[in-house]
Amino acid sequence: MSILKNKKYKQLLMGLLFDGIGMLSFAIPFVGEFSDIVWAPLSGWLMTRMYKGKIGQAAGIFTFVEEIIPGFDIIPSFTLMWLYTYVFKGVKKVQTIVV
């Protein structure tokens, strides 16, 4: 397997793990919401380290906000960012010729 694929799947596994950690606050009522105070900045920082550039910074801010607001932990932001980076962003646009 090439180095690119190794990095690609490593980021997917790490993203699934981080999304799982973020969703753990639903497992322990009331206590879990306080854990978001610690997890939100950490998850934002992890997102900026996993994905470089402006996209990573924007995703880090989104992840921070998503984790800090109660009830929004269900959004798998790391997995969505992986899908954007390796699936949707890689799709080439078809050029339309207007006659």
Image (tube, rainbow, N blue to C red):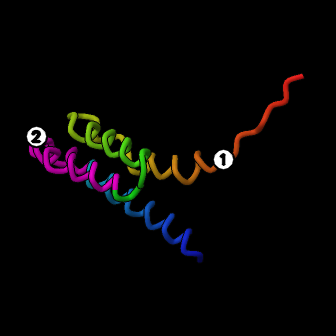
| Dominant SS in magenta | helix
Q: Dot 1 corresponds to which residue?
A: 91
User: Does dot 2 land on a helix, a strand or a loop?
Assistant: loop
Which residue lies at the image location 66% right of the left edge and 47% below the top edge?
Answer: 91
Residue 74 at what x, y percent from top left?
32, 41
Q: Is residue 33 magenta?
A: yes
Which residue lies at the image location 24% right of the left edge and 34% below the top edge?
Answer: 71
The quadrant in which the C terminus is found is: top right
Which residue lies at the image location 80% right of the left edge and 31% below the top edge?
Answer: 96
Q: Is residue 64 magenta?
A: no
Sequence-earlier tag: 1 or 2: 2
**Amino acid on which disc 2 is placed:** Phe
Task: Answer above or below: position of 3 versus 29.
Answer: below
33 and 65: which one is in front? 65
Side of 3 where 17 appears, left or right: left
Residue 77 at what x, y percent from top left?
38, 45
**Contact? badges 1 and 2 (CB < 8 Å):** no
Side of 56 where 39 appears, left or right: left
**Amino acid on which disc 1 is placed:** Val
- Residue 59 occupies quadrant: top left
Q: Dot 2 corresponds to which residue?
A: 30
- Residues in magenta? 23-48
Which residue lies at the image location 17% right of the left edge and 45% below the top edge?
Answer: 36
The quadrant in which the N terminus is found is: bottom right
User: Does dot 1 land on a helix, a strand or a loop?
Assistant: loop
Residue 81 at what x, y percent from top left?
45, 48
**The disc label shown at residue 77, or none:** none
